[in-house]
Structures are given as C-alpha cells and as structure tokens.
Image: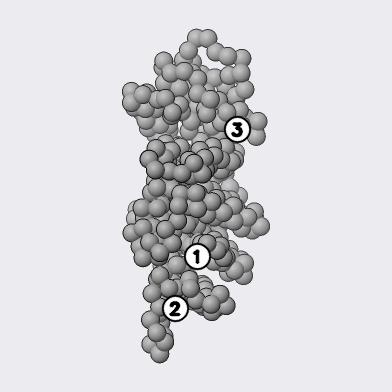
C-alpha cells in the first residue's frame, strides 16, 4: 500500500538529506518531490522571460509567487498520480514559511495539503550553527545571513505550523533530528510506539557516554528482533547544545530556552514511552528528572534504570524503577511486544 509523508524543515535543516537517506532504504520504492526545487524550475521555464535565479526567487511579487507555487503543486500532484504505478512511498519535502528580508510568508495553500492527503507529517530540525553553515553555502543564505535566534524562531514556527496541519487533517506529526535514522518512518506509519531515550548529558563523562551508547544499541536490538527494524526512538544527543564563542546574550538565551522546549514540548509529547538510563556511578540529572516527570504526568510509561541503592522518593514519579540493565532487559522485550500490539495504527 502506498503512503505519503510531508517532510518540513527550514532551509539548512537537513530535511533534503533525510529524504535522500530514506529513499536509499532497501525494499522501498520512494519518490521525493522537493517543492522548493520545483518552484524554482517553474519560475525558470519560460524562455521569453528573464532567467530567475534562486537568490531572486523570493523577491517576486507575492501574487506572482503564489501563482508559481500553485502551478508547481498542480503539476506535482498530477505527476504523483502517474508515479503511483511505480512507487509505494511519496515524500513531499517542503517549507511551511519563507523567511525573506525579515518577513515570514506562507509557502503553502490548504487546498494542496488536502489534495496530498498525507498519512504523516514530520518536521526535521537541527542546531542553529549547523543550519547556519548549510545556509551560508548558498547564495540566498549569504544574502539573508540569519543569526542563531532568527533560525531558532523560524524553526519553531515551522514545527508549530506543521503540527497545526496534522491536527486539522487528523494525522500524526513528529519533530525529528536531522540525523535520525529514516527507517523510523516505516515504524511510525505502522505503529504509534516511540521511545524518548533519556540520559545525563551535561556532566556525563566519556566513559558514561560510551555506556549510554551501548545501552541504546541493546534497546535498538529489541525492536530488530521483534519487527525486523530497530526500536523507534529519539536520542537527544543527536543535537548537542551550542558551545561556540561570539554569541550574543539574546542568542545564548534563545539556545538554552529552545533546548528545553525541544525536549519537553516536542520530543516528549510525541513519544509513547520514556526510558531513562543512568550509567552506574552517575548522579541524578535535573534534566532527566524533569523530563521523566513531564512524561509520567502526561500519560506516558516512564521507565528509569538507576543502580544506586538509595533513591529519592521523587524517583517514584515514574512507571517503574529498575536497579540494573539486566533487570530492565529481562522485562522490556515482552513489554514492547504487547505495546506494539496496543499502539498499532488502524
């Protein structure tokens, strides 16, 4: 059965690379429509008119730009009808809004969102320095030269609008880091089971981080054994916090606030389960504690692996506390199998 997924993300977010990696997966026949590229191609197609470059595209009169956008979507939807004879997965790689000359404008029309009838929506995000680097490798990016706060606010808007699309069309929506394994799309199309994987990060030693990674590999292997695909999970380490010099106070403040916002208000609400792992010898983390409490109090199953003998009563604000990795992995495979059955999409 064919499935359609709308992938959003601001320029430089890594959405196009994410789509390319998904397209390369075995056993799938994926067709990706990059709507930004298609808009530019439509603008450049008339030999009787001056050639329009990428850096001048968004300078066009808004009504003319909307007409080009509509023509691009009309042609793409017609192409998709023909492509359904060959492909079984369709990705629409697109933006929600353009941010050009300090003005945000819509890059979509509800009419086309309805016609696409996507099965799922995904917003791809990344840290502002990586986005900035990618944008500055292009002429439009160099012209606009957005600072980190601009990029964070634009990215936040992209996620909010995509979530609104999904809510209006009664479809699931996810915010995923650009380095996420794209095989997760297949899992989420079939099932709402998704783990937010937690760990101490700020003060974690290299030894602790290695133990966290080893635990994650065991967690992924459970899904591989049960479904033939890795356990669907989000690892917050895929986007580390900015530590560079030369940031303004506004940028530093925005980075810290958006880091917390991302974990508490994007990752956790979309997860079905939380797994918090403390490597032996590590101390309690305020971030992990706050995340576990937020998840537990919003109806998630929150599991904590903490080997210290003395635990705070507040550790009980969770579904279950395990005192060792082995105790957790003796429990988890059967739990996940039952959870997959419960959360299977109709």
| Residue at point 58%, 19% (across, down) | 315
Q: Where residue 322 is drawn, which disc sits there?
A: none
Q: Which residue is mark 3?
A: 295
Residue under label 2: 43
Q: Residue furthest bottom?
A: 48
In the rendered image, residue 280, in percent from the top left (x then y), is placed at 41, 17
* Crowd tier of the residue under label 3, counting other residues whose Cα lies within 10 Å: few below 14, some 14–19, many 20 or above: many
Q: Along the horizontal axis of the image, is 117 left or right of 227?
A: right
Is 337 located above or below residue 130 in the figure?
above
Give me the residue at 33% from left, 59% from top.
137
The front one of 141 and 79 is 141
Q: Residue at x 53, y 77 (%)?
A: 61
Is 121 on the left or on the right of 278, as rendered? right
Which element type, helix, strand or loop, lies under badge 1?
loop
Q: Check the image and name the residue furthest to the top.
A: 309
Given residues 91 and 263, the one toward you in this image is: 263
């Amino acid at each position: 059965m064919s499935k359609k997924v709308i992938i959003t993300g601001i320029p430089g977010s890594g959405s196009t690379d994410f789509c390319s990696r998904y397209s390369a997966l075995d056993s799938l026949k994926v067709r990706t429509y990059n709507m930004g590229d298609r808009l530019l191609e439509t603008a450049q197609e008339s030999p009787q008119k001056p050639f329009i470059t990428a850096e001048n595209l968004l300078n066009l009169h808004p009504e003319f730009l909307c007409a080009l956008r509509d023509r691009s979507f009309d042609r793409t939807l017609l192409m998709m009808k023909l492509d359904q004879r060959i492909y079984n997965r369709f990705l629409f790689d697109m933006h929600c809004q353009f941010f050009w000359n300090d003005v945000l404008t819509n890059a979509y029309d509800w009419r086309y969102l309805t016609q696409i009838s996507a099965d799922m929506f995904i917003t791809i995000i990344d840290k502002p320095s990586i986005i900035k680097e990618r944008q500055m490798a292009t002429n439009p990016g160099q012209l606009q030269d957005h600072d980190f706060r601009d990029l964070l606010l634009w990215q936040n808007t992209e996620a909010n609008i995509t979530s609104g699309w999904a809510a209006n069309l009664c479809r699931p929506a996810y915010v995923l880091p650009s380095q996420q394994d794209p095989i997760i799309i297949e899992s989420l199309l079939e099932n709402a089971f998704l783990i937010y994987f937690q760990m101490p990060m700020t003060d974690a030693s290299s030894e602790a981080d290695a133990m966290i990674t080893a635990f994650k590999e065991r967690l992924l292997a459970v899904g591989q054994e049960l479904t033939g695909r890795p356990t669907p999970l989000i690892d917050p380490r895929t986007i580390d916090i900015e530590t560079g010099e030369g940031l303004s106070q506004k940028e530093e403040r925005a980075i810290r606030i958006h880091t917390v916002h991302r974990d508490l208000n994007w990752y956790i609400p979309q997860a079905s389960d939380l797994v918090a792992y403390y490597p032996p010898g590590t101390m309690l983390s305020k971030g992990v504690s706050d995340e576990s409490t937020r998840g537990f109090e919003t109806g998630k199953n929150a599991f904590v692996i903490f080997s210290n003998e003395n635990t705070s009563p507040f550790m009980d604000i969770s579904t279950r506390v395990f005192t060792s990795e082995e105790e957790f992995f003796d429990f988890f495979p059967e739990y996940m199998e039952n959870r997959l059955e419960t959360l299977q999409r109709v």
